[in-house]
Amino acid sequence: MRMNVESFNLDHRAVAAPFVRVADRKELPGGDVLVKYDVRFTQPNESHLDMKSIHSIEHLTAELMRNHTDKLIDFSPMGCQTGFYALMLGVETDEFLPLIERAFSDILEATEVPAANETQCGWGANHTLEGAQDAVRAFLAARDEWETVMRDDA
């Protein structure tokens, strides 16, 4: 039975993380197109990112990607802790991949996690710049694999 949530229809056993894929596309009444990307860091049901790293990657990407585009609507972690969703305004894959690569490269150069304090964040102590940089470094090292979503044997 087909479910309403796109990712619930994806066989998580058949994917080959890390990858980046279009998870959804919606045309708005005014003609704008929202594109939702699945930015998957780890293999579902085999590994996951720790919460401090996820939280820090979320803050860093949400802030730093906006230095390269005004078309980022949202960058949010997946509850399963295996990746993130990026919601973009009219940004297709050939434009998105270099954007995420630039933002993640910026994370490697960061000296602090933006807004990692009690005033600007609901859990300001729950961050790790080093953990975020380690996860992003591994993701960037697999750049050649990003467009391969499914395993060969799937």
Image (cartoon, rainbow, N blue to C red):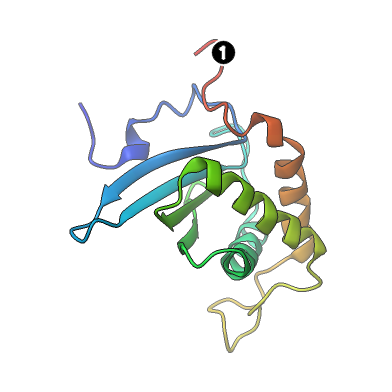
Residue 66 x, y percent position in the rendering: 57, 68
Secondary structure found at label 1: loop
Identify the residue at image location x=57%, y=84%.
Answer: 120
Residue 63 x, y percent position in the rendering: 60, 71
Count of marks, rendered view: 1
Residue 44 x, y percent position in the rendering: 54, 34
In the displayed structure image, the side of residue 115 where residue 110 appears, left or right: right
Name of the residue lying farthest toward the top: 153
Identify the residue at image location x=57%, y=31%.
Answer: 147
In the displayed structure image, the side of residue 62 where residue 106 appears, left or right: right
Q: Which residue is mark 1?
A: 152
Quarter holding the N terminus is top left
Mark 1: few/some/many CA within 10 Å (<14, 14-19, 20+) = few
Three-letter code for the amino acid on which mark 1 is drawn: Asp
Tell me, yes or no, if residue 129 can be seen here: yes
Tell me, yes or no, if residue 81 can be seen here: no
Residue 32 x, y percent position in the rendering: 29, 57
In the displayed structure image, the side of residue 136 where residue 91 appears, left or right: left
Rendered image quadrant of residue 138:
top right
Identify the residue at image location x=54%, y=47%.
Answer: 95
Foreground of the two, 56 or 37: 37
Rendered image quadrant of residue 146:
top right
- On screen, 116 above or below 152? below
Identify the residue at image location x=50%, y=60%.
Answer: 75
Foreground of the two, 83 or 33: 33
Rendered image quadrant of residue 139:
top right
Foreground of the two, 27 or 141: 27
- On screen, 110 above or below 25? below
